[in-house]
Amino acid sequence: FYPIGTPGKPWSDDERNEWKESRKHHRSYKEEVLDKLDKLKSNDALEVVQYGALSHNPGRYPLFAVKSKQWKEERSTLLVTGGVHGYETSGVQGALLFLETQAAKYTEQVNILVAPCISPWAYEHIERWNADLKDPNRSFKKGNETEESAALMSYLDSLNVKEWACHLDLHETTDTDELEFMPAKHAEAGLAYSGEVIPDGFYLVGDSEDPQLDFLQAIIDGVEKVTHIAPEKVICGESVAKEGIILFPTKSLGLCGSLSLGLCRGITGGTYATTTEVYPDSPKATGEICNEAQVAALVAALDFVLGPQTEDIPRFYPIGTPGKPWSDDERNEWKESRKHHRSYKEEVLDKLDKLKSNDALEVVQYGALSHNPGRYPLFAVKSKQWKEERSTLLVTGGVHGYETSGVQGALLFLETQAAKYTEQVNILVAPCISPWAYEHIERWNADLKDPNRSFKKGNETEESAALMSYLDSLNVKEWACHLDLHETTDTDELEFMPAKHAEAGLAYSGEVIPDGFYLVGDSEDPQLDFLQAIIDGVEKVTHIAPEKVICGESVAKEGIILFPTKSLGLCGSLSLGLCRGITGGTYATTTEVYPDSPKATGEICNEAQVAALVAALDFVLGPQTEDIPRFYPIGTP
């Protein structure tokens, strides 16, 4: 028997007071909820609004919602409710995590409205009931309100929402349902409680009058990427409609999950609504997983309801927790999950060995990666007849190892074009700066660092430090030109950028991949004639990106964007930082080809890199090569 009351008799007022007086504070609403809401006040897309306070302690228990700052009446509205049962932690924290990491990206398509902690007294006391021994989740209908439900319904009514797109009410089912809350509920009514089986996993409660099974299944599909789905055939006394889905008459019961169905104006069965239930006491779950499951449910629901409008919003990266930078364990998890996909020896070193017989070129080892020096030696190729009085061409490839044509394009230039320029200019090519990343087809190096942000003193990776040290040793007096060879690939959006953002604990909203070749110039010294000459040369081999905005920057000319490359520490700024006595006269750019275009092949991408190098050299050397005839397209000079 429950320790308060007499079996068979409803509680008296004294017994109800005994229950209330025996409750204790277990956590802080201010620290765990209000402080997080304060941080959201600086979010450009969201607005924090107080809609009421609990009368028995208004200073301690103000009631807040968070809504789109750019609220538009013509848009439909997403409603998220959490903490109806205050003890269900992930209902509150999942709603807050959604606000912190995902909500802003949807504000262009739908009004966002989130009430993250409807019952703050119960949150602090870890209780199902409110302070008046009432269950707020049975009170969302007229004439049966609690203070919590009345305040929220009044606020929602004031908004005059014309269309509710979707409503998710975030809950948990916990072991304490069986140990405390359900026994107390039955004892208060004088009833015996025989117990129920707690489902081991996530499930949904839909509306039996309008099941919307496709919508519910879409949420299940999204959540099972984060946590396991309850396998039971009967949940809460109801046979499942599908795995992890049960149906109740939510509106007639006055459940919070039916709010939008009752409040929307002019909407019939078109409004999507459900109640989520996670199981935090499972040995397969943690608090963080439960919070992520709530967010995954919201994202899946919105993607289902809004359809193509959010197809470009990625799911969470499979490592880490949204909103939290990776721990050392998570960084190790990433590294240990990487695999060899190709051979640096066969695809790079063997080609360099063949170049050792070239009369005009010399292969030089300038270092090795310390974690496996035998497998990852670092090589450059330079003019055999190196002359200090000549200016020098610098070509870098494989700064991002996964960008294949950066490496293979540099090697193809060495094999087919470099020798003919060695009478006019010193040639220096580092074809594969990041060989570990080349073999593993990764953007990062083995230490989860991006070598392309490390070409400045004090921020070096092992790869960049080795190359900068080697270049410094050459005492180059004049850099004629530097081309850093890159690709932009579909895997930037599918893997590398999501991983980069996840590692920092940031959300990634995605970008459009340009379909074609483009150049990144230096905004401090644009050199547009030089860049245009390269574009003119490359478009004979492959197509130029037609987009007006690339990487968030408006194009300066078709296929040309400008960044502050030197301040960012990009490899493409190397010659600008290393040259001695050179001001704005050094020409430098980063090439970007798009190998995943239906118009491109690997061979075309390699040829585009070579075409860029040839066009750049012909522009820079100018009169020095006027006597060198252009080559007929058949044959070898």
Image: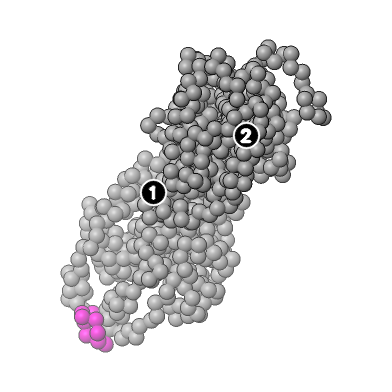
**In the image, residue 417 above or below residue 624:** below
**In the image, residue 369 above or below residue 26:** above
Q: Is-magenta flag for residue 3?
A: yes
Question: Which residue carries the number 1 mark?
Answer: 325
Q: How many marks?
A: 2
Mark 1 and mark 2 lie on one chain; the one further toward the N terminus is: 1
Judge by depth and name the residue closer to the eye, 149 or 352: 352
Mark 1 to mark 2: distance in Å?
Answer: 46 Å
Q: Position of residue 63 (x, y in %)?
A: 32, 54
Question: Which residue carries the number 2 mark?
Answer: 356
Q: Quadrant for the C terminus, please.
A: top right
| Residue at screen point 39% across, 50% down | 326
Res. 516 visible in picture: no
| Residue at screen point 37% across, 67% down | 280
Judge by depth and name the residue closer to the eye, 322 or 188: 322
| Residue at screen point 46% across, 56% down | 336
| Residue at screen point 75% across, 29% down | 540
Disc 1 vs disc 2: which is toward the camera?
A: 2
Which is the main secondary structure of the residues drawn in magenta? loop
Question: What are the residue bounds of the magenta stretch?
Answer: 1-11
Q: Position of residue 281 (x, y in %)?
A: 35, 70
Q: Is residue 95 left or right of residue 35?
A: right
In which quarter of the view is residue 125 placed?
bottom left
**In the image, residue 579 above or below residue 197:** above
Res. 297 visible in picture: yes
The amino acid type, in three-letter code, at marker 2 is: Lys
Judge by depth and name the residue closer to the eye, 580 or 424: 424
Q: Is residue 632 left or right of residue 1?
A: right
Q: Quadrant for the N terminus, please.
A: bottom left
The amino acid type, in three-letter code, at marker 1 is: Pro
Of all residues shown, which one is farthest toward the top? Answer: 623
